Image (cartoon, grey):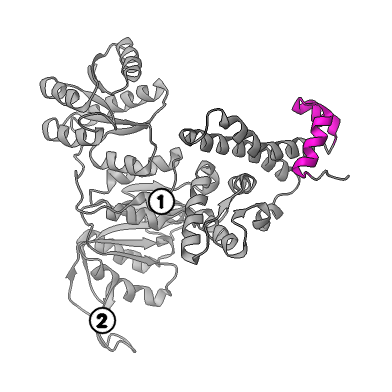
Amino acid sequence: MLLNRILVADDEESMRWVLSKALRKKGFTVDLARDGEEALRLIQSNEYDLAILDIKMPGFTGLELLDKVRELKHDLLMVIMTAEASMKNAVEAMKRGAYDYITKPFDLDVIDAIIEKVHKAREITSQMTILREELKERYHLEKNIIGNSPAMREVYKTIGKVAPSDVTVLVQGESGTGKELIARAIHFNSKRIGKPFIALNCAAIPKDLLESELFGFEKGAFTGAVERKLGKFEQANGGTIFLDEIGDMPLDLQAKILRVLQEKEVTRTGGSQNIAVDVRIVAATNQNLEELVRKKQFREDLFYRLNVVPIQLVPLRERKEDVPLLVDYFLQNACAELEVSPKKCSPEAMALLTTHSWPGNVRELENTIKRAVILSSDPLLTPSDFPGLRARQTGSEATAADDLSLEALVDMKLRASLTNLDKMESGDIYNLVLKQIERPLIRFVLEKTRGNQVKGAEILGINRNTLRKKIQELGIELRKD
């Protein structure tokens, strides 16, 4: 067996007991620590193959323990556990050398999967690459990239792993998914922080001007070149260049980009001198580069040089659990930018936003929120403030959306209420949640029964007179067929 001895460090006795029982049942030797100091002492005096550390413990935190252990045991693989699924924690843990990052509560299958990954990793190498322990400055990702969905947590972990190195990264995703934000996150969590980050959209610049934008030009190189100009690669020297929509780059320029990657030098248009540049390249595209390679529209050798570490951003429709977080973030930003009083979304509006397909992804959501903030004078945004979204849902699509809206509404309000339990009076959670879902629930059931109150009362499990009273109190309009 490649993996024999495991350390579990957590200040919760129940967590230590569950993990130790499960791991010992699988034949592992397990030692337990209740705080960071005890964990460090055990690591100093024993040999472990894996350490599972809680991020918040008395003594040393899990992150501090990562730093200290890396100085002593370069081959010890460490997994960080946390009850707070924040992007900052995920990125910081992976940057400091964590092997993986898991969020409580989790199934024991997750631990099994991690152990399997450790087995495979030890078959390939006996040491993990030590990530950079500390950055002189931090780019606060959590204020820019929003999302706690599984897909986004994987992105955060990849950023943490790849940022300290200089490998080329290819970010792929639909328009509006935030590819440039990911590129900036990589740069500002790398050793190149403090150096330039230069972004260039290859699709936004005419082909005959793109070369001079990238590589610069000498005075007199062409009509209008009245003085020397440095290209983007020289401007980014020592830092990172972000080549957005690289799939639109002409083939002749692709060859020159490949030369920069191989030779680490550029030549200005109209010049003959080779100029050395130290630049990390992060490229992005919303196209299928492999398909372009098959069509001979993109160089195969350049594709493989760019695709060293791929990051795939999923569209917003595939991570709808992140929509409420994004809505709150964009509302706060829009109100501050436009200098208007704070606004919030009603539960019905939030449910509508959550179920929309968002073909324009995060960018479309941001613009939609900003438009609503500008046009609405009410501090509470309702579905009527998002008419374009409601208009797109008809027939079976509307029915499916209603189903999802109710589910999203209940889930959202329940989570919000439970989060603020400490601020509520005893016994208030029932009334709070019920009050906020009663109207959409009754309206939802009546729409399903085509306004049949007898059938609706049966489904709801209430008296017909009670239902009629609720309809009047809540101002619910009945459909007229």
Q: Position of residue 472 (x, y in %)?
A: 80, 41
Q: Position of residue 1 (x, y in %)?
A: 24, 16
Question: How packed is label 1: few (under 14 Cα within 10 Å), some, or many (20 or more)?
Answer: some
Residue range corresponding to the magenta coloring: 452-476
- Tell me whether the residue at label 2 lies in contact with that at label 1, contact meaning CB atoms closer than 8 angstroms: no
Residue 71 lies, with reference to residue 296, above or below; the image says: above
Q: Nearer the viewer, residue 238 or 323?
A: 323
Residue at position x 21%, y 50% in the image: 135
**What numbered label is drawn on residue 270?**
2
Q: Splitting the image into 4 quarters, where does residue 289 fall?
A: bottom left
Most frequent secondary structure within the magenta stretch: helix
Q: Which quadrant holds the C terminus?
A: top right
Residue 158 in magenta stretch: no
Q: CA distance from mark 2 to mark 1?
A: 41 Å
Residue 303 seen in render:
no
Residue at position x 62%, y 61% in the image: 376
**From the viewer's perspective, is the residue at label 2 or at label 1 nearer?**
1
Disc 2 secondary structure class: loop
> Would residue 374 be found to the left or right of residue 91 on screen?
right
Residue 176 lies, with reference to residue 61, above or below; the image says: below
